[in-house]
Image (spheres, rainbow, N blue to C red):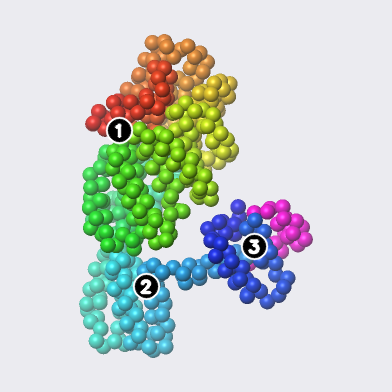
């Protein structure tokens, strides 16, 4: 998919029709071919593109046409977004644009009226960046308005600048953490992330005590979530959830004006409750999330819905409703085929796990076929941990289906590819786990021996040191079920409730 097709992917049918009309009006000659190329790119007909453009024209001519089309498309989408977006932030931006026009034409009274209106809207939005610009313009043109209380404007400018600086420091810290996480997840970089978070917060002078806006709360929650994930212990940030919930309740009247961050926050809070195995609380926040997704003509639905369905199906599955979990995941995958590939991959892998827990290896196998890229590709696109998890699930699936040779081949590949990385990040238990699966494949009767069962128990004990990740427990549940000759799903839930429960681990 090239750059033009990526933009087309986010366009509605109305956008496509409007852009075609825009090109028609703009074309002064009949031999431009931009509409023809645009239609071919919509159809994704690579052969037609090659035959009609690359062969008939030189490669340079094709690329020149593509560049002009891309430039036109970006300009069109920018203008259309600005014209059609009715949210209050865009209204303020439009007021600032017209304010400058008025000042240029010496319509000073109208300009200051627009600024006052923009200020009122920005204060309600708690948009410090826009307020900074508004106060800057008011101060710049203060000499044109003798009744403007300049000292009061300067004080407002300084007070707002403090809040803006605090938000910017948080944004810088967030950016540094996201960059480091990219290096860790997608390139396998070895780093003490816990120390990195601590040093980043200190070096950037970030305060997590005072929450200013939905955006700042999202950034803080994101950092808290990653900190808990790296420690495999979400109880560490439990106290912060209470503070976050109180903030949301106190700003309920502003929630719709900050829908993007509000939805992110609700998702993170639901996820933290899920990881702490407080499934009922997770469902409460998921319900709130869906409520927000359906507002504003479902503006953010397509962007967030698969994340919602992923967490909803996981919550149902691990709270004793596996049938509904499978139904939710299957329906979501069927109805959202054009969603973000990363979200699709996450949901598909979870659905495979659901099927394996119900001893339905065939259904799992049909879904696994869709993962047709190399391990390196998934490491780059989905992250190192995700690629490792996917490989482990595939090994269990082939083991469950009694594809012994294939499972052993995947284990050999897994060791060759990931052993060094896993040992370097202190995850020796993953290699112990894979070795136990390999022993079982080579000699199935080993399951009943005291030595093998003791090895599984040692692994469980080593993993039980804290509130272990729910997905790690799922892998352990599969292996324990084999040694006890019990159903996988029931064994996994029993581990969660009795062996790795929050109260048990505290």
Give the image quarter of residue 145. Answer: bottom left
Question: Which residue position is annotated with label 1?
Answer: 467
- Report the disc number at residue 455: none
Mark closer to the observer (3, 1): 3
Residue at position x 50%, y 70% in the image: 79
Location of residue 210 in the rendering, given as x and y in whole percent from the top left corner = 23, 56
Give the image quarter of residue 406. Answer: top right
Residue at position x 26%, y 47% in the image: 241
Q: CA distance from mark 3 to mark 1?
A: 53 Å
**In the rendered structure, are the residues bearing label 1 and label 2 in contact, judged by CB atoms less than 8 Å apart?**
no
Looking at the image, residue 360 lies above or below residue 271: above
Q: Earlier in the sequence, mark 1 or mark 2?
A: 2
Decide if residue 256 is in sight here: yes
Q: CA distance from mark 3 to mark 2?
A: 34 Å
Look at the numbered disc 1 and give the secondary structure of its residue.
loop
**In the rendered structure, are the residues bearing label 3 and label 1 in contact, judged by CB atoms less than 8 Å apart?**
no
| Residue 87 magenta | no
Question: Which residue position is annotated with label 3?
Answer: 38
Write the start and end of the magenta stretch as one range. 44-68
Q: Residues within 10 Å of mark 1 (few under 14, many from 20)?
A: many
Look at the numbered disc 2 and give the secondary structure of its residue.
helix
**In the rendered structure, are the residues bearing label 3 and label 2 in contact, judged by CB atoms less than 8 Å apart?**
no
Look at the numbered disc 3 and give the secondary structure of its residue.
helix
Q: Is residue 498 left or right of residue 76?
A: left
Q: CA distance from mark 1 to mark 2?
A: 47 Å
Q: Earlier in the sequence, mark 3 or mark 1?
A: 3
Location of residue 74 in the rendering, given as x and y in whole percent from the top left corner = 55, 65
Location of residue 326 in the rendering, given as x and y in whole percent from the top left corner = 45, 37
Looking at the image, residue 344 lies above or below residue 459: below
Where the C terminus falls, by quadrant? top left
Q: Residues within 10 Å of mark 3 (few under 14, many from 20)?
A: many
Residue at position x 42%, y 45% in the image: 309
């Amino acid at each position: 998919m090239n750059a033009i097709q990526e933009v087309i992917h986010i366009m509605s049918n109305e956008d496509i029709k409007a852009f075609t009309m825009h090109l028609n009006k703009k074309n002064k000659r009949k031999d431009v071919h931009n509409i023809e190329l645009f239609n071919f790119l919509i159809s994704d007909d690579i052969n037609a593109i090659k035959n009609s453009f690359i062969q008939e024209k030189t490669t340079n001519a094709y690329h020149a046409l593509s560049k002009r089309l891309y430039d036109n498309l970006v300009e069109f989408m920018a203008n259309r977004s600005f014209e059609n977006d009715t949210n209050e932030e865009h209204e303020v931006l439009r007021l600032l644009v017209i304010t400058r026009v008025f000042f240029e034409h010496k319509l000073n009274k109208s300009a200051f009226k627009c600024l006052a209106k923009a200020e009122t809207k920005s204060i309600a939005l708690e948009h410090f960046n826009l307020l900074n610009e508004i106060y800057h313009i008011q101060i710049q043109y203060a000499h044109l308005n003798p009744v403007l209380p300049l000292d009061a404007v300067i004080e407002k400018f300084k007070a707002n600048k403090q809040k803006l600086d605090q938000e910017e420091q948080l944004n810088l810290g967030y950016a540094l953490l996201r960059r480091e996480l990219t290096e860790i997840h997608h390139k396998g970089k070895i780093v003490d992330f816990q120390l990195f978070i601590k040093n980043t917060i200190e070096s950037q002078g970030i305060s997590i005590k005072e929450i200013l806006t939905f955006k700042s709360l999202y950034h803080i929650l994101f950092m808290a979530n990653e900190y808990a994930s790296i420690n495999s212990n979400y109880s560490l940030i439990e106290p912060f959830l209470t503070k976050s919930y109180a903030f949301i309740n106190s700003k309920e009247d502003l929630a719709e004006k900050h829908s993007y961050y509000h939805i992110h926050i609700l998702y993170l809070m639901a996820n933290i409750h899920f990881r702490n195995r407080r499934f009922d609380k997770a469902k409460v926040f998921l319900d709130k999330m869906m409520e927000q997704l359906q507002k504003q003509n479902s503006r953010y639905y397509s962007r967030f819905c698969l994340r919602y369905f992923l967490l909803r199906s996981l919550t149902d599955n691990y709270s004793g409703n596996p049938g509904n979990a499978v139904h939710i995941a299957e329906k979501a995958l069927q109805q959202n085929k054009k969603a973000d590939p990363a979200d699709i991959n996450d949901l598909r892998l979870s659905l495979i796990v659901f099927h394996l827990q119900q001893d339905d290896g065939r259904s799992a196998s049909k879904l696994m076929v869709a993962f047709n890229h190399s391990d390196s590709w998934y490491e780059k696109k989905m992250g190192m941990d995700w690629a490792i998890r996917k490989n482990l699930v595939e090994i269990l699936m082939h083991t469950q289906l009694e594809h012994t040779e294939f499972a052993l081949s995947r284990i050999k590949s897994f060791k060759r590819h990931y052993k060094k990385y896993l040992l370097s990040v202190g995850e020796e238990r993953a290699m112990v786990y894979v070795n136990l699966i390999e022993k079982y494949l080579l000699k199935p009767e080993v399951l009943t021996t005291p030595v093998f069962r003791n090895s599984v128990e040692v692994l469980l004990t080593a993993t039980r040191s804290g509130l272990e990740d729910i997905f790690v427990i799922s892998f352990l549940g599969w292996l324990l079920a084999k040694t006890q000759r019990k159903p996988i799903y029931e064994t996994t839930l029993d581990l969660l409730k009795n062996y790795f429960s929050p109260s048990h681990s505290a």
